Amino acid sequence: MSEFDVGTKNLILEKDGPILWCTIDRPNARNALTPAMYFGIKRAVRIANGFDEPTALILTGTGDVFAPGGDLGGRYEEGDEHVPEGLTYDILPFVAIRESMAPVISAVNGICQGGGLLCAMMSDIAVVSDRSTFRVPELLRGIIDATYAAILPAHVGMARARDLIVSCRKIDAEEAYRIGLVSRMVPHEQLREEALKAACEILRTAPEARAHSKRMLNHQYATIDYETMFASLMHGNEPREGMEAFMEKREPKWIPKGLPA
């Protein structure tokens, strides 16, 4: 088995035959994704597309967490490569996953929220453990998420997308499967086996024809308005208040007094 460096020790990238396994491994922060990790997933997609022979990428996590989204408490860890200055949405891997000619499978082993859920949704197939849970939590922190606004209605319909985005409620694997958020739910102990099976199924299809079919499918998504999202992150008051409230373990100031728990 060959190993590859993607710029962070918190992503383990290993190749076993035609399968490239990318494991999110940051247990000290419950697999929260730093900029270096987001960029590293994007690098893993590029590596998967760089082999002469067809290769599939399987993305998974450790313990009971797939990925809860971006790290609100810290940006870098010792040994990680610094993401180039000036990048905004360029570091995000979601479009790279969606448009990858190499098959991308997400093997969701547990908690899957925020950017982690976007990785799973943009994969060709998301195989999820029956123990997994899902949530779109961005509005709880005052964050606009342009990717969800553009892609979630295509997956689950407008009414359900609106519900998940504006309520930020958590759903279990059974509901996620039922509403079409993910395509395959399996017993937890069979997750890796079933993810490998999905990757092998895709690798049996013709690469060029598959790429054209994916391009046609991707036309169903709306345009992603990253400019508004990142302008709000850089200059808006609500993202700052949401992150400060998270760090200080208090409720954001926008929550009405006397609101029932």
Image (tube, helix red, strand yellow):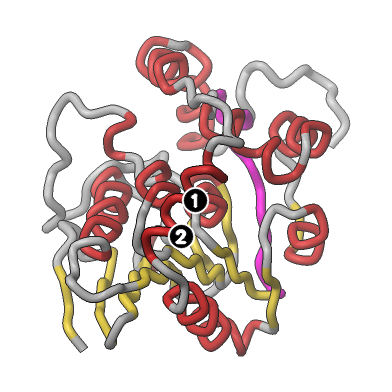
Give the Cα separation between the discs numbered 1 and 2.
Answer: 6 Å
Q: Which of these two is toward me, 160 or 189?
A: 160
Q: Is 162 left or right of 152, judged from the image as shown?
A: right
Tell me the quarter of the picture where residue 208 sits: bottom left
- 118 in relation to 251, above or below: below
- 24 in relation to 46, above or below: below
Q: Position of residue 68 (x, y in %)?
A: 51, 53
Q: Is 172 left or right of 2, judged from the image as shown?
A: right
Q: Secondary structure at mark 2?
A: helix
Q: Which of these two is toward me, 237 or 151?
A: 151
Could you tell me which residue is drawn at 25 percent across and 54 percent down? 40
Give the residue at mark 2. 210
Q: Position of residue 103 (x, y in %)?
A: 41, 65
Please report the bounds of the magenta region as a residue range. Answer: 130-143
Picture quarter with the C terminus:
top right
Give the residue at mark 1. 214
- 170 in relation to 221, above or below: below
Could you tell me which residue is drawn at 31 percent across and 73 percent down? 55
Q: Position of residue 202 (x, y in %)?
A: 48, 73
- Count neighbours of disc 1 (C-alpha within 10 A) and say few if under 14, some if 14 to 19, many if 20 or more: some
Judge whether residue 136 is colored magenta: yes
* Labels 1 & 2 near each other (Cβ < 8 A): yes
Q: Secondary structure at mark 1?
A: helix
Three-letter amino acid code at the position of disc 1: Lys
